[in-house]
Amino acid sequence: MMAGKWASPAHGAEGTAAPGGPPTVATAPLIFQNVHLHNVDHLEPNSNQEGVRLNRVPREVWEKLNAMGKTRAFAAAGAELRFNLAGPEARVLLRYAENRGGKATGWPVLAELYQGDLLMRCIEFGETWTTIVIKKPSNLAMLSGEASERGKLGFDSTLVRLTLPYMPETQLLRVEGDIAPPRADQVPALSYLAYGSSITHGSYALRSGETYPAQVARALGANGFNLGFGAAAYLEPEMARWIASRHDWDFATLELGVNLLRPISTEEFARRVDVFLHTIVAAHPRRPIFVIDIFTSGKALEADPKRAEFRQVVRKAVAALKSPYVRHVEGRSLLTKTTGLCFDLLHPSSEGFNEIAHRLTLEMQPVLRSLGRS
């Protein structure tokens, strides 16, 4: 899989785009030792050549990100190892590398093992190579029966999914066992892409499955792509062009603003929002996009007048698009109570993530239904 210093999945034929917009490209799944590395763009070797790092964005995009964004690109928010067990068991060897999160915050570093849609267990691992043994569940036939009752929304019950922690960086050594990559009919037909700050990334969630993008994807029966970048969602044009170039998502949420309150002026923020939105919407004029402004914060943070200015910028930018497919969503309408915040009065607690996911799902469902997307 490795070529030179980094390896990226092959791209298929180019698609079409709106005039002036980038072409959409088909991105082939990244397969490593018969495992599909979902929400991972390419692999990079460790400096000591032991194992690989998982980068969520292409190298040419990564090079243009801000310094924190370059770090966060290796934090595996929304990343999963997906495969089918042909033999009795598989063994996954992984470890974490401190990446301004994880153990440093006192949070356990947890991988989540799913059989299809259903959580089997959470597994804590450390900074040394840890072997996770995955066996076929003894009640697989029963799980298949439950899946047929739910219909085709969601994942096939025979598919193994090892969801990696959103923080810190997870590194992969190898996968052992008689396994095969997923089939196309084992994953949801619809895909949801979420871009945003640490709140999208998942900061202060206990585990990845608790983040609002993961909860929304489950509720809508969709395949989720998490492009959250804690403290680093700077709306780079390269990021916008990459999102615009992809054809592997059917609807998206773009959470804009909070990371740029300190670094730039309101006028510069308006310029970046305009470029970011126009780039993506021009390429996907008929795909539903929900643009979220700054979430609820504590009173002291809300006293900053730039918060109101930034929210107004997002509202006006969406209105200027005049697109029935692009909706503005007030962050404060999704997270309505400061009791849903953690001690920093900025990041959601478990209660806050649950409220965001619930209200966002309710916001999205009728729109997706009316467009035949759910």
Image (cartoon, grey):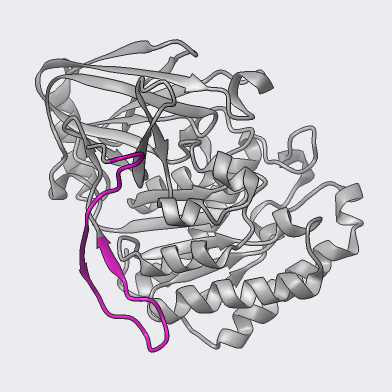
Residue farthest front in this picture: 4
Residue 265 at x, y percent in the picture? 81, 68
Q: Residue at left 42%, top 45%?
A: 56
- The image quadrant of residue 270 is bottom right
| The magenta stretch spans residue 218 | no
Q: Nearer the viewer, residue 2 or 262?
A: 2
Q: What residue is drawn where x is 53% and y is 79%?
A: 278
User: The N terminus is located in which quarter?
Assistant: top left
The image position of residue 181, as x and y in percent, is 15, 37
Residue 162 location (% of width, % of height): 33, 28
Residue at x 84% of width, y 46% of height:
298
- Residue at (54% x, 48% y) in the render: 228
Residue 327 horizontal side relative to residue 232, left or right: left
State whether residue 198 appears in this view. no
Q: Is residue 16 magenta?
A: yes
Can see residue 309?
A: yes
Q: Is residue 299 above or below residue 279?
A: above
What is the span of residues highlighted in magenta in the rendered image? 4-26
Q: Kindly report the secondary structure that dominates the magenta region of the rendered protein.
A: loop
Identify whether 91 is placed above or below 170: above
The total of numbered circles placed on residues is 0
Above or below, 255 against 90 in this view is: below
Q: Quadrant of the C terminus?
A: bottom left
Relative image position of residue 198 (x, y in whole percent): 63, 44
